[in-house]
């Protein structure tokens, strides 16, 4: 419960700039879909799924399935992990400087040293990046987990997503990058300002670091996967002020287009994170329509259509509005909805045929301080940054 309460407070600290005067805080709610208790998909079998064709189980009689590069693949019935991050702290001394924002940065972000250790551990533990579009498919008119998902033998799938990668003004001067740009070789890199001088480095943002990591470890990516960027629109995207009321908007739009294209070429996919970052439970049907229209006009027009919708704060619509609001999201083309949970749970048999839900696991200071469960992804005690200061866990952090 504290987790949800703390999640909503993220808005109070980081999303204020997008919303102007704060609305009523969202009610604390479970993100688990359809009112069912989260269960591990690992305990379930998908209809028609079988391991019987893998070479290990049946070395003779059935041909093994090979990927294009001759990797032996195996039908994957276990959980598909999905972990998400926020923008990366590259200067912890600025983020953790004792200001009233420090606690929020500590709770919701990871530092550069933590990021590098996390991906080294994920790789060592045989996780492999997989595209959301590989995991979620529309089959026979129904959105579902891909029952034919195959993985390289011995590897486990993980989707990585990064939320709120807009580099809002509230981050500036606090140890974050300013924007994503292309370097002289045409690769996406992060631009940041150090002592008034603009510099670029791929390990100054998680998305660009993943690109670099995959270049160094090609077997960390399955079928060219990188991850998913969940973007709002109220302060533009990727560090470019593309929102309607921004000065020099058309120049900003032209400047971000090649960055989007390069990310897509790299294997990144995109998700709506709503336009305004308001909790879906605070939006009337009319406001949800307006919010989705604005995302469509100002963000989808740049990214292209996507079936993915990442709920702000991870809040699913409350039961009485669930059908109406998901129907509305469906009308805007969103069919795979990402919430937040303590495990990467996929609703295996949705009663609503037009959408499917996956819970994602937060990787941030709060989850490292409070969730031993992250240990199946990486050893928290090895990753946790010494730059983080001691503070009580789980307190109200909205006001300092
Ligand atoms: Zn968010």
Image: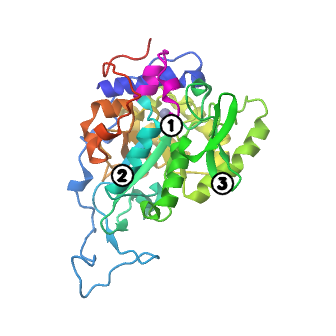
Q: Quadrant of residue 275?
A: top right
Describe the element under mark 2 as helix, strand or loop: helix
Residue at 33% across / 17% down in the picture? Answer: 395
Instruction: Give the image location of residue 336, x and y in percent.
Output: 44, 49
Residue at 34% across / 56% down in the picture? Answer: 124
Q: Is residue 347 above or below residue 340?
A: below
Q: Is 100 placed left or right of 377 in the picture?
A: right
Task: Mark 3 vs mark 2: give the one in front.
Answer: 2
In the image, is the residue at mark 3 within 8 Å of ligand 1 by its beta carbon? no
Instruction: Give the image location of residue 42, x and y in percent.
Output: 24, 55
Q: Quadrant of the C terminus?
A: top left
Q: Is residue 151 above or below residue 352?
A: below
Q: Which mark is residue 261?
A: 3
Alpha carbon distance from label 3 to label 2: 27 Å
**Lower position in the chain sequence, tag 3 or tag 2:** 2
Alpha carbon distance from label 1 to label 3: 22 Å
User: What residue is disc 1 on?
Assistant: 88
């Amino acid at each position: 419960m504290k987790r949800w309460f703390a999640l909503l407070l993220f808005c109070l600290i980081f999303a204020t700039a997008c919303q102007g005067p704060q609305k009523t805080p969202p009610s604390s709610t479970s993100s688990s879909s359809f009112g069912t208790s989260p269960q591990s998909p690992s305990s379930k079998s998908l209809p028609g799924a079988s391991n019987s064709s893998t070479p290990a189980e049946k070395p003779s009689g059935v041909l093994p399935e090979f990927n294009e590069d001759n990797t032996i693949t195996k039908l994957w019935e276990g959980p598909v992990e999905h972990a998400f991050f926020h923008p990366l702290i590259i200067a912890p001394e600025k983020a953790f400087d004792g200001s009233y924002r420090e606690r929020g940065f500590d709770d919701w972000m990871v530092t550069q040293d933590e990021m590098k250790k996390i991906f080294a551990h994920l790789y060592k533990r045989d996780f492999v990046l997989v595209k959301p579009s590989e995991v979620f498919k529309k089959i026979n008119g129904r959105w579902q987990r891909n029952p034919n998902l195959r993985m390289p033998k011995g590897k486990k799938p993980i989707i990585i997503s990064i939320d709120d990668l807009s580099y809002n003004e509230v981050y500036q001067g606090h140890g974050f990058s300013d924007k994503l740009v292309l370097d002289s070789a045409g690769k996406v890199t992060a631009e940041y300002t150090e002592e008034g001088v603009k510099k670029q480095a791929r390990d100054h943002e998680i998305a660009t670091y993943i690109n670099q990591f995959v270049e160094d470890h090609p077997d960390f990516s399955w079928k060219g996967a990188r991850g998913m960027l969940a973007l709002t629109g109220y302060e533009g995207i990727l560090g470019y002020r593309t929102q309607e009321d921004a000065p020099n908007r058309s120049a900003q739009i032209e400047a971000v287009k090649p960055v989007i294209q390069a990310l897509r070429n790299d294997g990144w996919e995109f998700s709506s994170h709503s336009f305004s970052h308001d909790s879906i439970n605070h939006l009337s049907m009319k406001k949800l329509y307006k919010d989705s229209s604005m995302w469509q006009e100002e963000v989808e027009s740049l990214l292209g259509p996507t079936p993915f919708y990442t709920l702000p704060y991870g809040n699913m619509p409350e039961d009485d509005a669930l059908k109406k609001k998901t129907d509305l999201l469906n009308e805007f083309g969103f069919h795979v909805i990402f919430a937040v949970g303590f495990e990467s749970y996929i609703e295996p048999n949705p009663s609503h045929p037009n959408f499917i839900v996956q819970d994602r696991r937060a990787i941030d200071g709060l989850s490292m301080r409070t969730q031993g469960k992250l240990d199946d992804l990486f050893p928290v005690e090895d990753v946790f940054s010494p730059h983080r200061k001691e503070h009580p866990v789980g307190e109200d952090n909205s006001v300092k």
